[in-house]
Amino acid sequence: MNKKGHVLNGVLLAIGLGYVLEPAGDVATFRTIAATLVPVTLGALLPDVDTAFGKHRKTLHNLPVLLIVAAYPIYFGNLQYVWIGVATHYALDIIGSRRGIALFYPLSSTEYGFPTGVTTSSTYADAVTVVVTIVELALIAVVVHVVPGLLDTAVESLPYAVENTTNVFS
Ligand SMILES: [Zn+2]
C-alpha cells in the first residue's frame, strides 16, 4: 500500500475509533477523534520510513518494532495511540497488498501476506483500504463492547458468588 492508502486508513480508523469508544456522537466523540487522528496517522506512516532507512517491508515492518512503539505509553507516558497506526499499517500491507511483510525480522526475512491483496497501483487499492478499515473497526467494537459482557456472563455463571465471599480480615 502507498502513503495515500496508509493516510486514508489512519484517518478513517481514528474517526471510527471516536464512534466506537464514544458512540453518543457528542463532544466526547469528537474529542476522541481529535486525540487519535494525528497519532494514529503518524503511526500509519512510520513503517514505510524503511524505504529510505534499512530494508523495505522488513526493518520497520515487524513485531519487535510494534512492541517497542506500544511500550512507549507504558514506560515513558507518550506516543499514545501511535502503536494503533503501526498495527493497522501491518494489517493493510498483509491483507491489502500482494507482497507481505517480514513480521519476525530480524530473526527471519520471510515475508507474510495474504494472496488476496491488490497491487498498490490498482484502481481497487482505495476500496480495499476502506474494507480493511471497516473490518478493523468491527473487530475493535467487538473487543470493546461485546467481550467485557461475555466475561461478566462467564463470571456470573461460575458456581460461586464472588461478591458474597467473606472477608476474613474485616
Ligand atoms: Zn508498508
Image: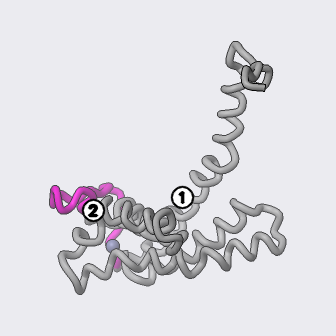
Q: Secondary structure at mark 2?
A: loop
**In the figure, 28 relative to 137: above or below?**
below
Identify residue for label 1. 136
Residue 110 among magenta residues:
yes
- In the rendered image, the residue lying farthest to the bottom is 52
Q: Secondary structure at mark 1?
A: helix
* Ligand 1 positioned in quadrant: bottom left
Which quadrant of the rendered structure holds the N terminus? bottom left
Q: The disc labelled 2 sits on which kind of residue?
A: Gly
Q: CA distance from mark 1 to mark 2?
A: 18 Å
Q: Quadrant of residue 170?
A: top right
In this view of the protein, which residue sits in the foreground, 67 or 29? 67
Contact check, label 1 and label 2, Cβ < 8 Å: no
Q: Position of residue 18 (x, y in %)?
A: 69, 68
User: Along the polypeptide, which appears first: circle 1 or circle 2?
Assistant: 2
Tell me if 61 is positioned left or right of 76 in this view: left
